[in-house]
């Protein structure tokens, strides 16, 4: 047949059947959503589903505006943050010049560039996996920055990003803050000052709602106007009624989420110590996962043996520089103690072979 699209899709982590496993491969939250979410679910009136969901998702937008101390006019909701990111790529990168992002970052960025025919350039990260922003060329189509970055877990400061916004006042800088709540600095306060900044957020990580599919973007009225026009050009009702109601409830329980996410950060620090004792080198992380490597045993060996023990983690054999690293999501204390024990057993077994 003629005229069919050829494209290499993004490959997400596995979603195995959930019983009897420790699932640490897609950076989901270790804890359940807030009790307010459960209550919203239980009191949802199914009869309302005969109506379309609201176009503006006003109750969710207002709750988010209040949470971030910004006007509602800056907020756009989406079906997961993948959706708002895809919209942002289509809305803001219409120039002939390439957009820039690191060679090691969220694997969806190059896929969207291919899908939407956006020229792009991947910038090799430094030896310590930092992104040398000052080395970017003077002419470019835009910059995309996961902050903190995935899969490295490293973050940039607000000051560094502000310098970037000032350097390219007529180009859009997208900052993907999917993991910000686990130790990163947010640039949302800069939206008031910089019309060229677009920030994306998700309910999948810090709000423990990956299965609900809700994300959002925050930007100046000018950028929001463009992104909403694009959104309304193909899927205006991207956030369904149930998702809006549950995400609104989650937004109102800051206290619960602060508690579980601080707990995850504390578990991460303990797990990093356990990894160090086993001889691993781990990149200091500002996220709910770590990227770690062992000098004697390959990531593939660990990956396969962990899987045999029903522990799912991720590694990236196609990404040469980190092919020997494991990316491990931070679970509960009990899960991480178990992971450390299995890792220790694998090291002992391998050394005795
Ligand atoms: N950005 C980054 C850096 C991510 O790791 C992810 C999750 N894979 C996303 C965005 C998208 O997450 P979601 O669509 O679940 O909001």
Image: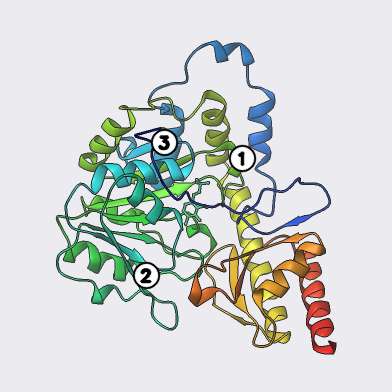
Which residue is located at x 35 percent, y 27 percent? 234
Which residue is located at x 67 percent, y 84 percent? 276
Which residue is located at x 15 percent, y 58 percent? 169
Q: How crowded is mark 3: few (under 14 residues within 10 Å), some or many (20 or more)?
A: many
Q: Residue 40's image quarter?
A: top right
The spot of residue 91 in percent (x, y) is 26, 42
The alpha-carbon separation of the residues under discs 1 and 3 comes to 16 Å
Circle 1 SS class? helix
Which residue is located at x 52 percent, y 41 percent? 251
Number of marks in the rendered image: 3
**Closer to the camera in the image, 291 or 61:** 291
Which of the image's four quarters has the N terminus? top left
Circle 2 SS class? loop
Q: Do the residues labelled 1 and 3 touch (CB within 8 Å)?
A: no
**Closer to the camera in the image, 15 or 254:** 15
Q: Mark 1 or mark 2: which is in front? A: 1
Q: In this view, does 296 lie to the left or right of 49?
A: right
Q: In this view, does 98 lie above or below 159?
A: above
Q: Earlier in the sequence, mark 2 or mark 3?
A: 3
Is the distance from the Cβ of mark 2 to the nearest ligand 1 atom less than 8 Å? no
Is the distance from the Cβ of mark 1 to the nearest ligand 1 atom less than 8 Å? no
Disc number placed over residue 77 in the picture, else none? 3
Q: In this view, does 337 lie to the left or right of 228?
A: right
Circle 3 SS class? strand
The spot of residue 56 in percent (x, y) is 38, 26
Name the colouring of the figure.
rainbow
Disc number placed over residue 157 in the picture, else none? 2
Is the distance from the Cβ of mark 3 to the nearest ligand 1 atom less than 8 Å? no
Q: Mark 2 or mark 3: which is in front? A: 3
The spot of residue 141 in percent (x, y) is 20, 57
């Amino acid at each position: 047949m003629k005229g069919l699209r050829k494209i290499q899709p993004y490959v997400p982590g596995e979603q195995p059947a959930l019983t009897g496993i420790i699932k640490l491969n897609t950076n989901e939250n270790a804890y359940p959503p807030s009790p307010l979410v459960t209550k919203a679910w239980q009191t949802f009136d199914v009869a309302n589903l005969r109506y379309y969901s609201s176009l503006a998702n006003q109750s969710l937008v207002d709750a988010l505006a209040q949470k971030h101390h910004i006007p509602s006019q800056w907020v756009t909701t989406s079906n997961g943050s993948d959706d708002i990111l895809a919209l942002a790529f289509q809305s803001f990168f219409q120039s002939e010049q390439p957009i820039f992002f690191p060679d090691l970052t969220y694997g969806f960025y190059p896929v969207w560039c291919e899908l939407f025919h956006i020229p792009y350039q991947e910038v090799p990260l430094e030896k310590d996996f930092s992104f040398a922003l000052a080395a970017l060329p003077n002419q470019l189509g835009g910059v995309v920055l996961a902050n903190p970055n995935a899969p490295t877990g490293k973050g940039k400061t607000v000051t560094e990003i502000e310098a970037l916004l000032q350097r390219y006042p007529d180009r859009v800088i997208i900052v993907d803050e999917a993991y910000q709540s686990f130790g990163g600095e947010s640039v949302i306060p800069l939206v008031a000052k910089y019309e060229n900044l677009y920030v994306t957020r998700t309910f999948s990580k810090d709000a423990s709602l990956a299965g609900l599919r809700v994300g959002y973007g925050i930007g100046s009225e000018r950028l929001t106007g463009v992104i909403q026009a694009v959104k309304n050009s193909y899927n205006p009702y991207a956030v369904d009624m149930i998702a809006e109601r549950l995400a609104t409830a989650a937004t109102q329980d800051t206290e619960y989420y602060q508690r579980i996410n601080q707990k995850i950060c504390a578990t991460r620090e303990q797990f990093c110590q356990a990894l160090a004792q086993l001889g691993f080198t781990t990149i200091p992380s500002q996220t709910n996962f770590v990227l770690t490597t062992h000098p004697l045993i390959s990531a593939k060996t660990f990956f396969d043996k962990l899987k045999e023990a029903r522990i799912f983690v991720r590694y990236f054999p196609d990404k040469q520089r980190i092919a020997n690293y494991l990316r491990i999501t931070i679970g509960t204390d009990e899960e991480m103690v178990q992971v450390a024990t299995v890792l220790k057993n694998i090291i002992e077994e391998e050394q005795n072979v």
